[in-house]
Amino acid sequence: MGTKAVWLYRSFRSLLDSCAVVSRQHLLHLGVGVRGVEAGGLRIPIGREKMRGGSLCSDDMPAIAIRPYRSDDVSDLVALFRASVRSLGRRDYTHAQVQAWAPDLIDESSFARRCLTKSTWIAECEHRIAGFSDIESDGHIDMLYVHPDFHRRGVARALLAHIHEIAQTRGMERLYTEASITARPAFEAVGFQVVTAQTVTVRGESMTNYRMEKQINRAPRP
Ligand SMILES: CC(C)(COP(=O)(O)OP(=O)(O)OC[C@H]1O[C@@H](n2cnc3c(N)ncnc32)[C@H](O)[C@@H]1OP(=O)(O)O)[C@@H](O)C(=O)NCCC(=O)NCCS
């Protein structure tokens, strides 16, 4: 981290330390405030144990950094996608369904095209890619995947907060997605609502997912 970023991060931390009770949502709002100055990086604390009882973090707290997708990320994203679906998705879908969703053979160049044709964002933690998501120009979120090693540590929440901020900045009126059974609670946690349940067929396997959406409130003018 450069000197300016260290100063900003310390100021951010002392601001947090002055709060008696701070929810994760508050942290995200504060983190979003820091992001613009820190050259495109969103850094927020990670790990629920750090938040228990409203107490905040120690100096060695790992953070989530959000950055844009780069072409050399593709192999890591394919591996993360496969691990995420086969491990986390397996809780709600059969073996055959997760194999169809994330097969052994995934064409990296098609996957790279899928990332490049959208605004794709990477969540990093401790120099590892912890998750990724994206937003299309009409507010559609195509992908949201978190590595099993970082499950339930606020990575999806951080990515969706970042995407919400992009949508707000671009004047979009809504975000929408087709959420898996596994992802439904993560979308609900940040204000998405189910529009309808549906059955889709992927490589011959039928599976349930949910059309979900969230209305975007315009940011108040300063
Ligand atoms: C869905 C997924 C992206 C969630 O990622 P995550 O980083 O673990 O989610 P977060 O830690 O940010 O969770 C945010 C909130 O969502 C809810 N949530 C997430 N996972 C949940 C679960 N398994 N059960 C209940 N609530 C859950 C909780 O409210 C959570 O907040 P809390 O931890 O403070 O209680 C991840 O499980 C995943 O990659 N799943 C497999 C792939 C998949 O289904 N992708 C979606 C394709 S549309």
Image (cartoon, grey):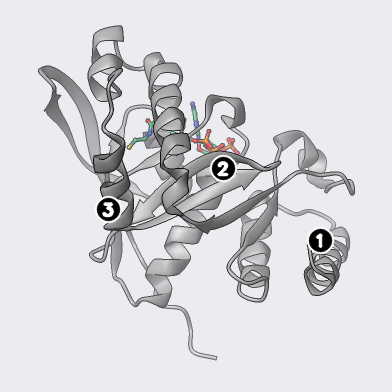
Gap in Å between the C-alphas at discs 2 and 1? 19 Å
Question: x, y percentage for residue 122?
Answer: 50, 49
- The three-letter amino acid code for the residue at tag 2 is Val
* CA neighbours of label 3 inside 10 A, class few (<14), some (14 to 19), many (20+): many
Label 2, residues with CA under 10 Å away: few <14, some 14-19, many ≥20: many
Give left or right: position of 168 versus 154: left
Q: Are marks 2 and 1 in contact (CB under 8 Å)?
A: no
Mark 1 vs mark 3, CA separation in Å: 32 Å
Q: Amino acid at mark 3?
A: Tyr
Q: Which residue is mark 3?
A: 176
Q: Are marks 1 and 3 in contact (CB under 8 Å)?
A: no
The yes-or-no answer for disc 3 within 8 Å of ligand 1 is: no
Gap between marks 3 and 2, in whole Å?
Answer: 19 Å
Indicate whether 63 appears above or below 37: above
Secondary element under disc 2, as helix, strand or loop, is helix
Residue shown at 31%/71% (left/top)? 172
**Residue 155, label in figure:** 2
Drawn side of residue 23 relative to residue 61, left or right: left
Q: Quadrant of residue 206?
A: top left
Decide: is 181 above or below 73. Answer: above
Which residue shows up at 81% across the image and 44% down it?
61
Q: Is residue 26 above or below residue 72?
A: below
- Tell me the quarter of the image containing the N terminus: bottom right
Residue 75 x, y percent position in the rendering: 43, 36
User: Where is 199 relative to 141, above or below?
Assistant: above
Of pointers 2 and 1, the one earlier in the residue sequence: 1
Counting other residues with Cα less than 10 Å from the Cα at mark 1, is it few (<14), some (14-19), or many (20 or more)?
some
Query: Can you name the residue that lies furthest to the top here?
Result: 95
Instruction: Report if the beta carbon of the residue with label 2 is closer than 8 angstroms to ligand 1.
Output: yes
Residue bearing mark 1:
16
Q: Nearer the viewer, mark 2 or mark 1?
A: 2
**Amino acid type, label 1:** Leu
